[in-house]
Amino acid sequence: MRAVFHSWLWLMRRSASGLVALLIGLGAFELIQPVAIASLGDLDRLTGLLNIVPPAFLALFNVTPEFLGGSGLTGYLSLGFSHPVYHLLSGATVIWFACRGLAGEMERGSIQIGLSRPMSRLQVYLARVLGVFAVTLLAAVAGPVGMIAGIAVSSPVGAVNYANFITQGAACALLTGCIGGATLLISASASRMGQAVGWAIALLVVSYVIDYFADLWETLKPIETYSIFDYYDPPAALVSGVIPAMNAAVLLTVSMVGIVLGYVVFTRRDLP
Amino acid sequence: MTERNADYHAIVTTFLSKQYKQVVALNDVSLRVEAGAIFGFLGPNGAGKTTAIKLLLGFISPTSGSAEIFGHETWRHGVEARQHVGYLVPADAFYPEMSGRSQLDFASRLSGSPPILRRPLLDLLELADADLDRDLRQYSKGMKQKLALVAAAQHDPRLLILDEPTDGLDPLIQRRFEQFLREFNSRGRTVFMSSHDLAEVERLCESVAIVKDGGLVAHQSIEQIRRMRYRQVEVTFASEAPDGRVWPDGVQLQSANGHRYVLAVEGDINPLIEALAKYEVEDLKITPPSLDDVFMTFYESAGSSKHRSQYQAAESKIEVS
């Protein structure tokens, strides 16, 4: 296990600067949300604004004006966690890390440094899995921390249940972990980092597009269940403080399946 | 794997093959590298050297056959097989954003053995402490190669696998590293190295294997390989030249120009010397068989019947290490 720990620590160290930049971006984006809401004054003005927003735009956030009108400040704050930019930043963080640590190292040959020593492929892979867990956790914390900081700075009108940020963080972790698990499988299968990143982003975009259009077109509703975003519900987490058990189960299962299949592929494949 | 093999052989491959779809990268290669030897692994680009090394380290799985290091099969029992191995990772595989020192520490921690040879290697290769504190982005190709060599050997492994070890090193450092390998080897350590520098191989290695087109075309000692080739003898007679029929067996006339003859001598040279002693010789020049020539012959015509028969004849006479 010492080799796994050293390998994990090394991964984190060498990714530190990139990770910090992405996490700061994530936190900063969430910090902006309460500041923007506060700048509009009371929530009624925001509700009025949202009433004139086209449904296709609101579908990006997976909410209705009615829900927002009834949920108060936390409802509006939850938009920050379903915003496409948030998904882009959190997805990029975990995809970059998972692809760099496996496909990127196979491409460069760096993975040989560990594998030419008495270290098994399981240990090498386990270090990457631990790294993805750590990055998932950091990404899940960065957003809520940024938003809480934004609330402290701007003091928007309305009540906030801070305990629900923990639930929101858990929801973020489930989604990011799910993306991380799937990316580990892709990364273990690829031989080049660019190839792995491309496939992971493509998968993420397709999943997002399915969820988006299923909200707009009733005929696409049946396939919405194939999108991971269907199981991610920031309003439920931030407003009600709950994560539906089904959502958690699906996201966890996808994550675990990705991790296990990634292990199977990585331990059987030839290195490039 | 018998206990004897584990004790006496650092590396054993048995009909080791690797095929990628339609391409046969390595075909039925059987090798034995005695523990405590310095073994050269040679071949032109694309011959299968890197594939063989990857198979030895468990980076790829064999299509058929097996590879063992100190008695441990390298694909299924890779951790045990690599327990006492140092491998020269390609210099570009190191992390450019990290310092040289941190990479050596990382490699050492993964090896699980203290880096007892780090300091002497750093001194020998002239890699200063100040250099170690810099990112690899600031390293030259030669410095990266030096770092890779230190990372491979710092934990004093029982077997050192080196792919082009002196690539990018200046001649002085190259000679020093050769000296290090000799000392390393004198402590019973094994070195398995591939190189394009045949002079280096000749200086260092006791035995070699030559691969071409994925197949093994020779596997014997340097001396045996030398004996398989012709020496070139240039002889200038002071007076009348002898009749061509006086040449002993194994001597072929390559060219004649007046009293100057160029002969190719296979095997023992003494019969020719005895034959020449009967004449008045003005000048005699014997060029020892160059390994370059020998290897080039193997590289170019390994498939020809002549060399195959030479190889088979030599094989039948010797027990390969």
Image: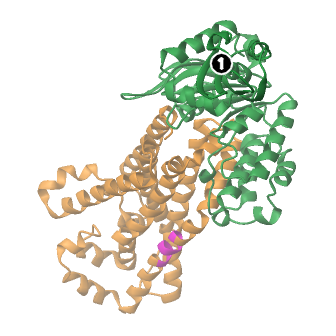
Chain colours: A orange, B green
Amino acid on which the number 1 mark rests in the picture: Met
The percent coordinates of residue A184 (x first, y second) are: 46, 47
Q: Main secondary structure of the magenta part?
A: helix
**Chain letter behind tag 1:** B
Decide whether residue A27 is among the magenta residues: yes
Residue at point 52% right, 46% down? A106
The percent coordinates of residue B280 (x first, y second) are: 78, 21
Q: Nearer the viewer, residue B166 or B275?
A: B275
Which of the 4 image quadrants contains residue B320? top right
The percent coordinates of residue B157 (x first, y second) are: 78, 35
Residue farthest to the front, as pictured: B239
In the picture of the structure, the residue carrying the numbered disc 1 is: B228
Relative horizontal placement of residue A69, taking residue B169 as reference (left or right): left
- Reply above or below: A131 against A270: below
Q: Magenta segment range?
A: A22-28
The quarter in which the N terminus of chain A is drawn is top right
Please indicate, yes or no, whether residue A70 appears anywhere in the rendered image. Answer: yes
Which of the 4 image quadrants contains residue B50? top right
